[in-house]
Amino acid sequence: MKKTFITLLATALVVGASAQTADGGIDAKMLERIKSGYTNSPEQRAIKNALASASIATLSINGDNLAKCDNHFSHRVKTRGITDQKSSGRCWLFTGLNVLRAKMIDRYNLSEMEFSQNYCSFYDLLEKSNLFLQAIIDTRSRSLDDRKVNWLLRHPIGDGGQFTGVSNLIMKYGIVPKEAMPETFQSNNTRHMRTILSLKLREYALALRAAKSDKAASALKVEQLTVIYRILVECLGVPPTEFEWTMRNRKGEVVSTAKYTPKSFYEEFIGEDLEGNYIMVMNDPSREYGKVYEIEYARHVYNGDNWLYINLPIERIREMAIASIKDNTAMYFSCDVGKYFDRKKGTLDLKNYDYESLFRTSFPMSKSQRIQTYASSSSHAMTLIGVDIDDEGKARKWLVENSWGAKSGDKGKLIMTDDWFSEYMFRLVVERKYVPQDILDMLKQKPIMLEPWNPMFAPEE
C-alpha cells in the first residue's frame, strides 16, 4: 500500500509539473488536468448528493463498527461523580483536581465531592496575567516584530493549561471545596472575560514597553495587576481565606465540621508534594526518545515550573499507566480527542469512521508525520481511570473520566481502544512510584528547551 501510494504521488507530481505555469500557478491546461479528478460518474454524483445534505461524520460512520463498546474493565480506579467544565477551556484544571478528588473520596469513604475549580481558576488567571506582564518587561529591549514579543502579544492570556499549572497553583494557594467558592456564570462561560482581560493586558504591555526603566515598569505592573484583580473578583468572586466545611461519609453521615484555610485544607486532606511527586511523559515519535524537553513560557506562574516531560515510546507509557490503575491511582491524561470520536457512543476508536471509503482515497500518515505537519496534537485533558487487560496481559481498551458533564459520552466517561491510545495519546502524568528507575534517571539530563509557539505544545482546553 505504501509503495503504491508513493508511486502514484510521484506520477501526479510529474504530470502536474509538466502542466503548470513557470511561476507555479494554475494555467488552463493544468486546470483541465485537475478537473479530470471528477468525472460525474454515478458513484461520484451519489457521494456529492449525499454530502450536500449530511455531515461527513454521519456519512463516514463505519456500519461494521456500530455495536456499543463493551464497558467492562478488568482494572478500574474507584471514582464517584462527573464534573462539567461547561463553556470554558479548563479541562487541564478539572483533570488535575479530579485526580486528587478520586484519592480523597477513596481515602475518606466520601459521597460525591468536588474541589473548587473556580478558586484555582481565579489565581490561575491572576498568575498568568503577571507572567505575561513580566515577560513583556523582560523583552522590553526587543522590537515589536521580534518573534517572541509577537508570540506574547498574540497569547496574552487563556484558560487552557497543563499539569504544572495544577501543581504550582495548589502548592502556592492551597485548595478549597466547591462549596467555599462555587462557579459563577463567568467561570463557566469564559470567552468574554478572556477577551476583556486580553484587551487590558495588551494595553498594559504597550505602557510597560514605554516605561522609562525596568524599575518604573515593575512598579507600573503592580498597579496594572490591581485592576486585573478587581476584574477577576467581579467575574469570579472573592477567593476565601478561611471557611468552614463539613465532611460527610458515603452514607451522608457527618464525620467532622471544622474551619480551614485553603492551605490547611490541602495539607489535611491531600498533603503530598505535587511539584516533586509527579512526572510528565510524552509520546512524540517526531522527536528523539529518551530525552527530556522543556517548553519556554509554558507555565502558569512566573517563578514556577515550565512544562517539562520525558519523551518515551508508547510501550513504556502503557506499562506505567497499567501499573498506576492496578494500584487504584488515577492519572492526568491528554490526547487529540477529536479524532475518530463517536460522541453518541462515547468511544475513541480508529474504526469509528471510514473516511477512506467515503472519499475513495487513503490517509496514510504516521503519528510522527501528523505531528510534523500539524495534523495532530494534544487538545484535551481527561482523567485516566481504567484499563481492560486480556489473558496475555495486553491492554484492549482504556477508560477516561471526562469533564463535559454526565450526559456526555457513556455517562460522562469515554472508552478508547488500545489502537487509538497508541495513535492519539500524547501525555500522561504519573506518580514517581510507578516510574521505572531507568526513566527517572533520564531526568538527570539537561532539558532541551523548545520554543513556546510550537502548536504541539498549545495549552489543553
Image (cartoon, rainbow, N blue to C red):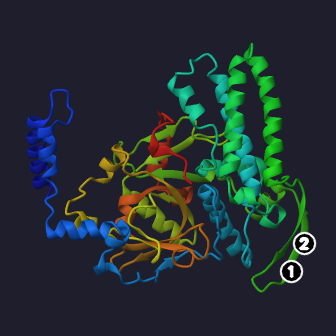
Front-most of residues 417 and 330: 417
Q: Residue 450: percent from the left, percent from the top?
A: 47, 35
Which residue corresponds to mark 2? Answer: 257
Q: Position of residue 19 (x, y in %)?
A: 10, 37
Residue 255's spot in the image, x, y percent?
85, 78
Q: At which x and y percent is residue 144?
A: 57, 21
Q: Are marks 2 and 1 in contact (CB under 8 Å)?
A: yes
453 sits left or right of 211 in the view: left
- Would you say residue 271 is visible in this rendering? no
SS of the residue under disc 2: strand
Is 358 displayed left or right of 393 in the figure? Answer: left
- 133 vs 454, left or right, is right
Along the line of sight, which residue is nearer the eye, 230 or 181?
Answer: 230
**Marker count (numbered):** 2
Asked which quadrant contains residue 229, the reply is top right
Residue where numbered disc 1 is placed: 254
